[in-house]
Image (spheres, rainbow, N blue to C red):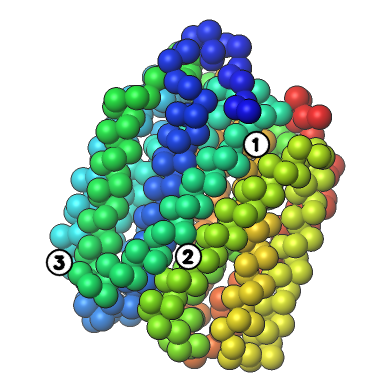
Amino acid sequence: MSAPLSPAAAQAQPAMSPVLVVVLLGLLLGLQPLATDLYLPALPSIQAAFSTQVSQVQLTLTAFLLAFGCSQLAWGPLSDRFGRRPILLAGMSIYVLAALGSASAETMESLIAWRALQGASLGAGVMCARAMVRDLFAPHLGAQVMSKALTGLGVIAFLSPVSGSLLVDSLGWRSTMQAQAVMGALALLLVALRFTETLARTNPTALQPLALARNWITIVRHPGFQSYQLLTCCTYAALFTNLAASSFTYIHVLGVSRTGYGLLMGSNALCYIAGTFLCRWLLQRMDVRRAVQIAGLASLLSATAIGIAALADARSLWAYALPFYIFQIAHGVHMPCGQSNAIAPFPQSAGTASALNGFTMMLIAFAMGHWLGLHLDGQSTRPMAFGIWFWGVCTALVAWGLVRRHGRVDGHR
């Protein structure tokens, strides 16, 4: 049964059905893995095409993520002031143009610049999607709604690396950027034709510097926000480590074919989808904090298995891939619980809270990407494995500590 809309949003904006909302959320959130996973199989080809260093190629990903995170600090207050619809229309329009620019780039510098613009514009879509959950749904239902939307994200993440591998093999790396432009145009069309404003009342003071600073301080100091914020940051950092390092590690170090790598990444997405279903099953039987603690144990055990495999210098693909399947399932619990409940205490500032959550996640991902660019050598699995191990331990500590102590949000069972 579909989750009911909150009374204020239902009264103000009755046009969109809950099913349409979930479809929109899934598509908007799914543009993020599309923009990364689809072109991961192309990274070695990009390196060869521009005859550049691995660290330069990594900048096409890390610059995208840094711009994606920083831009949300602007998009969030703007959406609280003017509404979600105009921000979505502007952001998706720029995203399509930037993806086409990436596809036509003739130098590594221009590719990095276009990817940064693409990340900045995508920040509008992902930030508004998270804020919409708080606009429309009561706090205790937000995690379940988010898990449904993230199931859609998982489907896109499943198709992206497999499609990316096929596109690179048949049409070259530029086709992965063109495909991103097509999907961005689809999202833009759906927003333009079917999206109805979800923000019941705009905040006229959202852009005033003093009010904005006070709002940021209030959000950042909230123990519940801190707990779920750190949870999403740690679990995403482990996922990003795998995304950023896996193509070089699996293809160059372990000898996996590009097509095999795409299939492997697609199977990871299937595990993530299973995790979102597990999330809904758990939330029907226990509160969010307990569900997160169970997933935290899975994160710890799976990441530790990967780290031990690297210490033993294991050269079997499955020594790393199988434990990461378990990590992906746990990630499918942590992300909907963390993203929805980080924003839940701030119904009047959902855009700003969503922006702070997204900014911090991407800032940590950028730092991790920079570290990986310096340490990936094409000879060892340890940079990837140790990064996943570190963040897996952090995820478990946050789940068992901060979330257990401060993670109760009004409206939880």
Q: Mark on residue 106?
A: 3
Quadrant holding the C terminus:
top right
Residue of label 1: 144
Residue 27 percent across, percent down from the top left: 41, 41
State whether residue 163 is above or below residue 80.
Answer: below
Give the crowd class for mark 2: few <14, some 14-19, many >=20 residues within 10 Å: many
Q: Can the viewer see residue 47 in this picture?
A: yes
| Amino acid under disc 1 | Gln
Mark 1 to mark 3: distance in Å? 44 Å
At horizontal 58% and vertical 91% (from top left) the residue drawn is 315
Q: Of marks 1 and 2, which one's residue comes earlier in the chain?
A: 1
- The reply to whether discs 1 and 3 touch (Cβ–Cβ < 8 Å) is no
Label 2 sits on a secondary structure element that is helix
| Amino acid under disc 3 | Glu
Residue 247 percent across, percent down from the top left: 44, 75
Label 1 sits on a secondary structure element that is helix
State whether residue 171 is above or below residue 129.
Answer: below
State whether residue 50 is above or below residue 377.
Answer: above
At horizontal 69% and vertical 46% (from top left) the residue drawn is 279
State whether residue 297 is above or below residue 93.
Answer: below
Mark 2 to mark 3: distance in Å? 30 Å
| Amino acid under disc 2 | Gly
Q: Of marks 2 and 3, which one's residue comes earlier in the chain?
A: 3
Q: Nearer the viewer, residue 27 or 239?
A: 27
Mark 1 to mark 2: distance in Å? 24 Å
At horizontal 48% and vertical 65% (from top left) the residue drawn is 266
Label 3 sits on a secondary structure element that is loop
Residue of label 2: 266
Q: Is residue 336 toward the left or the right of residue 354 in the image? A: right
Q: Of marks 1 and 3, which one's residue comes earlier in the chain?
A: 3
Residue 332 percent across, percent down from the top left: 63, 52
- Between tags 1 and 3, which lies in front? 1
